[in-house]
Amino acid sequence: MLSLSPCLTANTLTLKSHSTTTHRTPHHLKPISTTISASSNPRQQQKQPQQQVYQPFRPPSSPLPPHLRTLDIPGQIDILANRLGVWHEYAPLISSLIREGFTPPTIEELTGITGVEQNRFIVAAQVRDSLLQSNTDPDLVSFFDNGGAELLYQIRLLSASQRAAAARFIVENKSDGKGANELARSMKDFPSRRGEKGWESFDYNLPGDCLSFMYYRLSREYNRNPEQRDSVLEQALRVAESEKARDAIQKELKGEDVAEEGEVDAAEVAALVPVVRLKIGEVAAASSVVVLPVCNADEGGDAILEAPSECRTVGEFGVVVAEKGWEKWVVLPGWEPLVELGKGCVVVSFVDARVLPWKANRWYKEEPILVVADRSKREVGADDGFYLVKVEDDGVGLKVERGLGLKERGVSESLGSVILVVRPPREEDDGQLSDEDWD
């Protein structure tokens, strides 16, 4: 038998002999040590099962504050039904009941709190917590204890720092739910308005300036109603926080802020270049349609020149035949301005209407447009006409310019004259042209 030392560890490999005969190890072979670690033997390591650490189940933390965790379900329902306490104190009870399997309609039936109110309480409580976590003045936060759920709910989409600034503005100006909603929308929308007229005069870090800029932009929709326009500008002036913003509004009120060179009012060009919104289902209901090749504005003038010049229907089935292959086409109703066109018509797709050289309403700049141009009329003739040209900076993109501006720069030829601007369809009817406008 082999004698093993009693000091061997648990990982020591134990050797046992099944024979009483002892074997002498040759001197040229290294003897096997009885202290070989099992971890150094690959086969033994594979046979040894891996140790698994026991991890007990840990339920998610309760949404309830400590002083409400001892309440049973009837007690939670009683607090909600009787609105016992401040709204942000019992708001977590709604989440607690939902986790217990209650649905919003059931909670409404038991407590009288509608599903809309339930959602408002839950979200507003989260906004309130974020204000406290961002070290907002507790006295300012306490302003929302009485009926402030609707106000905090309106600023839910803002960042933590924006929420704190918005909350301060709401408290200082005693804003209602509608005012808080307009404030939040203006703060969220302000960065996307970079490049618009007057934008640089307003400070993004000041909630009042964001709201003021929204009114400043809105005033441009009332150019035909001076009284309403001035009323909106005065509203913008009341909420503006920076001196630079106030100065810009004052200039607008006094009429000192003239239009940029080459800009004209949209109403002045309505007769020259119709702007129409395509109605949903209008193409399907049309008795005749027009199929036109489409180019993206960023493809440049080469694409305009390469697009097919003619596309017609042949045979009893109206099979569409083009003079050459092309990737993108658009089908438009047979409006009279399009039907009267001959060869050379092309459509240019723009991501938004900032390319239009007139003072457009707000919705022009919030949606893509299609500009229909006639390539057979490339000469810059009428001063009040509109023409498709290359962007001068890089020569790649395309834009629309007035004839007068092109003549002043010595440009006598364009890529085509603009005959129609098409806006995309949407559910609501928004100032679309009637059938009489095309006659």
Image (cartoon, rainbow, N blue to C red):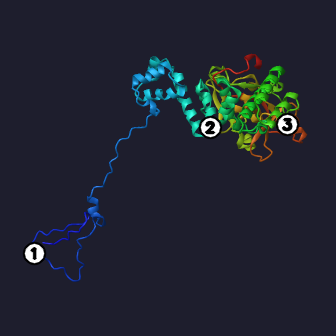
**Residue drawn where x is 74% and y is 20% of the image:** 433
| SS at circle 2 | loop
Task: Work out which residue is located at the far left of the displayed protein and give it.
Answer: 20
Disc number for residue 379: 3
Residue depicted at x 75% and y 32% = 213
Picture disc at residue 21:
1
Mark 3 nearby-residue class (10 Å; few <14, some 14–19, many ≥20): some
In the rendered image, which quarter is residue 191 located in?
Answer: top right
Q: Amino acid at mark 3?
A: Glu
Given residues 210 and 366, the one toward you in this image is: 210
Q: Position of residue 162 (x, y in %)?
A: 65, 37
Task: Give the side of residue 289 with respect to residue 220, left or right.
Answer: left
- Please indicate, yes or no, whether residue 216 appears anywhere in the rendered image: yes
Sequence-wise first label, 2 or 1: 1
As helix, strand or loop, the secondary structure at mark 3 comes to loop
Give the residue drawn at x 65%, y 26%.
425
